[in-house]
Structure formats: C-alpha cells, structure tokens
Amino acid sequence: MTSPTTKLSWTEYQAHEHARIERLFIQLVDAFRADAREDTQALWKVLEDTIAAHFAVEERHVLPVFMRDDEDEARALRAQHDEIRKGLAELGVAVQLHCLRDALAERFIAALREHAHREDVLMDQWLRRQGLAAPVEAQLAHP
Ligand SMILES: [Fe+2]
Ligand SMILES: [Fe+2]
C-alpha cells in the first residue's frame, strides 16, 4: 500500500517530520520501559531510518542553499546533525544492551527539540525571504 501524497510547504513538511521523529522517539522509550523488546528494536530502526532520511534531505537540498545566505548558522545546524547522529548511535547501543538510562533519553529528546525549534524558526524566516515556500510533494507516512 502506498502512502498518500500531500502538497505541503517546506515549513509544513519540516514541522510534520519533526513531530513524527519526536513521536517515534516517545514510542521507542515507552516500548523500552514496557520491556517490549521486539517493538523497541523495530521502533529504533524506524527512528534511525527516519532521522537519516530527514537529515539527508536537509543536507542535500536545504543547507547548501542556506549556506550561501548564512554560513555560520548553516554550519551550526549541520554540527547539530552530527551531534544528534552521535546521540542516536549511543541510543542504539543502549537499546541493544537493554540499558536505556533516563538521562540519555532526556538528553537526546532535548537535543532533538532544540534543533527542530531552531530550524523551524530559522528556515521559516529564511524560506520566506528567499521565496521558496512553494509546496513540495511529500510522502506522508503514518506509523
Ligand atoms: Fe529538520
Ligand atoms: Fe536538521
């Protein structure tokens, strides 16, 4: 079955993806706390793939253009991607070892939220300035 295709603006697409990533993370922590090991493994994989795909879109299509407008901010966003990737790898080890500590989960969700908020604010302002807020085709997945 294919997912429905919906026209979204870039900012709507971003907000949708950020909310989806946060939801997946919360589901993962809930599954871990319930000791639902198969669900935890499956959700971990979906979260990893979703974040990888989201960052790839931004790094391929958004940050290179943003770099020409505000290089420092684009580099800072890129550095946050690397930090979140590191956090994701730590999370993966913790899931494998069945020892996900609250402090690690809280640090990871705080980093995700801070990054998403920074992007939501900055990208919205920037895309409007650039006149790039045109709708994009987005595959909306409904986990
Ligand atoms: Fe993003
Ligand atoms: Fe990002």
Image (spheres, helix red, strand yellow):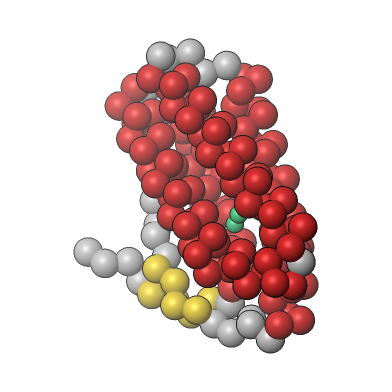
* Residue farthest along the left direction in this orientation: 1
Q: Looking at the image, which is closer to me, 118 or 33?
A: 118
Where's residue 6, x and y in %? 44, 76
* Quadrant assignment, res 44: top left
What residue appears at the point 44 percent right and 27 percent down from the top-left corner? 92
Relative to 8, residue 39 above or below: above
- Residue closest to the eye, 68 or 62: 68
How many callouts does the rendering have?
0
Q: For this view, does 27 lie left or right of residue 38?
A: right
Q: Residue at point 74% right, 63% down? A: 71
Whole-percent x, y for residue 83 in the image: 61, 38
Q: Is residue 122 above or below residue 134?
A: above
Quadrant where the image shows the N terminus? bottom left
Give the answer, above or below, for where 115 lies relative to 7. above
Looking at the image, which is closer to me, 22 or 56? 56
- Residue 58 in percent (x, y) is at 55, 62
Q: Is residue 124 visible?
A: no
Please tell me in which quarter of the rendered image ligand 1 is found: bottom right
Rendering quarter of residue 104: top right
Left/right placement of residue 1 relative to residue 104 reads: left
Q: Please give the name of the residue rendered at 30% of the width and 27% of the height, measured from the top-left corner.
A: 38
Residue 61, x across and y down, in percent? 53, 69
At x 50%, y 79%, the residue is 136
Residue 58: tell me if it is visible: yes
Quarter of the image for residue 125 reads bottom right
